[in-house]
Image: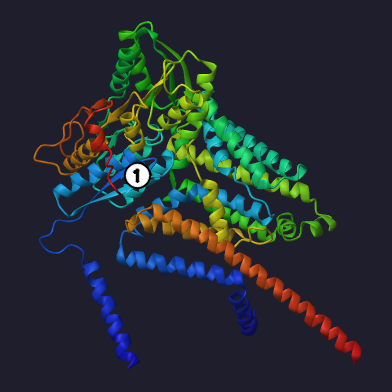
Amino acid sequence: MVRKFVLAALLAIMALIVPLQSGVQAGEPAEELYGMVVFLKGSEFFNWCYAGFKDAAATVGSHVKTEYLGPADWDASGEAKAVEQLIAMRARGIAVTAGDADTLVGAINRSIDSKIPCLTFDSDSPKSRRLLFVGTDSYQSGYEAGLIIAQLLGDKAKVGISLIPGLDSITHRVAGFEAALKEKAPGAKVIAKVNDEGDINKAEQVLTAMLQANPEINAIFCGHGNPATGAMKAVINVGRDSGDSKVHVMAYSIDVPILEAVDNDELVGTVAQYPYLMGVMSFLNLYSAAHPTQFDNPKYPGFGMVPTANIDTGVRVLMKGDPLLDYLKNPPKM
Amino acid sequence: MDKQSLLARCRHFLTDGIGAQHLTLIILIVLISTLMQFFFPLFLDPLNVETLLMNFFPEIIVSIGMTMVIITGGIDISVASVYAFAEIIVAKAMVEAGWDIVPATLFTLFLCCLIGLMNGYLADILSVHPMIVTMGTLLTLRGVNLAITDGRAVSGYSDAFAFLGQGHLWFFPIPILVAIVLAIIFGYLLNNHRYFRQIYFIGGNEKAARVSGVNVRWVKVSVYVICSFLAGLAGVLGASKYGAAHWGHGNMMEMKAIAAVAVGGANLNGGSGSIGATMLGVCFLAIVNNAFYIARVETFWYDVVNGGMLVLAVAFSLYVNHRNEIKLINQKIRASNRVEMEANQ
């Protein structure tokens, strides 16, 4: 009796294992794995990116699988490890957003050397041999935000900027913002720049101190996604969230609380990138690079065709009443 | 060794809680590896094994120092900041000051030793819990790392320096060789050298160690120095491997190192632990981490497993301590009963 039971159990296990081991069946295309590597994994922005990446992969076929990897904090070495892991898993393509441009150079180059197409999205690693960059023109996005503040306050604009020093994308956004102010409202001034370290609480703390030390400031530009909530709290802390002395806050995020704050007039606006589009374009270009056609890629021999120039996915400043606000309020679930 | 004493030693190993924990770890490592290889043939692929080891080499080096600190009954949570600090200093010394590899590395390691010295002395002189002191160092150094780099990465070293972290010797990646050699050296010293044996004595009973003439302060401080030195060395190799130094590198490394030591069966209250067991802990965590990637399980669950293993390891260590205490009490009772019986006779 016991022997029969053991035999039946073994057969049942074999029945489960054999299909797993047999892998691809005749006529089915081989499985292809594409990976997206991010920092701050789990943030709404990168969830949007991955949703685009995954949805684009689904249009190609069920044999195409995607993976969403990377550290939940701002550790670019963790991203490099994830890229190395995807190389070891023989991925067919890797899209990576560089938490630090230089740290990712080695891992991206190893991917290219292993004949695995690799591109950057959102944050670039220009010293690497990535095939191309898919993302927002940071300078232009800052410029658009600067135009709104210039239109709103004109030469009277006295601006404080919240940023993380050292990040190329943020540096370019701030440069674009300052260029727009200089061009459209030459009398406007940037009074202070503070380091929020990418943390909402820190942003509230340093921006409150900035407003107390510089009462002439009447606008805040958030150079990246995190500080807007802290900026709103800082404005309330110093009692300047309404009336003539109101401080106008321009955000740089499409997180739901920020979109709602724009709808409620608590923020003057928010710079919206198109992360879903970044994901879609990243996948489509990786897929193309992984499937060479009859003519070789002129810039990257051995890879399929991809644009030789970077892809700008565009930007839009969302203000109260913009129909895009409602659309973005339903972020994808992971 | 005759057959009976060998059997007795085996029996002792299995009935002793820590021995059973090590055996369980070895069985789990073999089982997970076998199952993973069966279902995912990429698992034991040489490239994946190299990636697995390279992704954990800083944790291997840092956990050697952490093991010694934990055996003394202390803890050092500043290692992540020391790691990033060493990356930045060695990079700045070479790229900005134009120093050669050797003086830049020695200077960096010297500074790391000073940090360890400060940690050890502050914890001992101020009699503040080492967690508080090293947390202060962690936060202070994080600020220093940000301030001296202005948040930017430092890169652009020579190929010779890059070889340290990216090169191979006899097919073995250099950082992994360094980690293995360090584990062997410190494992041997902890088992055999008088000075390092004192660490167990201090962790088991500090007062007794002091009364016995052990220079407790010096030994404890030196252990913190070794821990910071090893974190610094891991940082130097990390800077070379990634080709850049950045304040954000090595985040949460302290937790991984502590988890590895605890999973390896060390008592977090001090007195027990070994480098070999810690290496088993690192291996286990590295294999589970890699299995999550290869099996394409959402990697957030790895943190759940990591945290769960830490809690389980601490609970098991408490259970073993409790059981040993009861054993000791029973032995004392039996001994006193025997003395009483002999007196009565």
Residue A316 occupies quadrant: top left
The colour scheme applied to this rendered structure is rainbow
Question: The disc numbered 1 marks a residue on which chain?
Answer: A
Outermost residue toward the front in this view: A243
Q: For the point 21% across and 67% down, which residue is it?
A: A22
Check the image and report above or below for B155 versus B203: above
Q: For the view shown, which residue lies furthest in the top direction?
A: A187
- Disc count in the image? 1
| Tag 1 residue | A83
Q: Position of residue A229 (x, y in %)?
A: 42, 32
Residue A310, compared with residue B315, is above or below; it is: above
Give B75 or B160, whichever is nearer the viewer: B75
Look at the image and tell me whether residue B143 can be seen: yes
Q: Residue A60: x and y, percent?
A: 14, 48
Q: A170 or B290: which is nearer to us? A: A170
Q: Residues within 10 Å of mark 1 (few under 14, many from 20)?
A: many
Q: Position of residue A211 (x, y in %)?
A: 50, 20
Q: In the displayed structure, does residue A95 sit left or right of residue B272?
A: left
Quadrant into which the N terminus of chain A falls = bottom left
- The x and y percentages for residue B331 are 76, 78
Where is A198 relative to B252, above or below? Answer: above
User: Would you say residue B160 is visible in this rendering?
Assistant: no
Badge 1 marks a residue whose secondary structure is helix
Q: Amino acid at mark 1?
A: Val
Q: Residue drawn 43% across and 33% down?
A: B159
Is residue A250 toward the left or the right of residue B120 in the image?
Answer: left
The foreground one among B98 and A249 is A249
| Residue A204 as seen in the image, left or right of residue B296 | right
Residue under the image location 46 percent in, 41 percent down: B165
Residue A267, by quadrant, is top left
Q: Nearer the viewer, residue A169 or A111?
A: A169
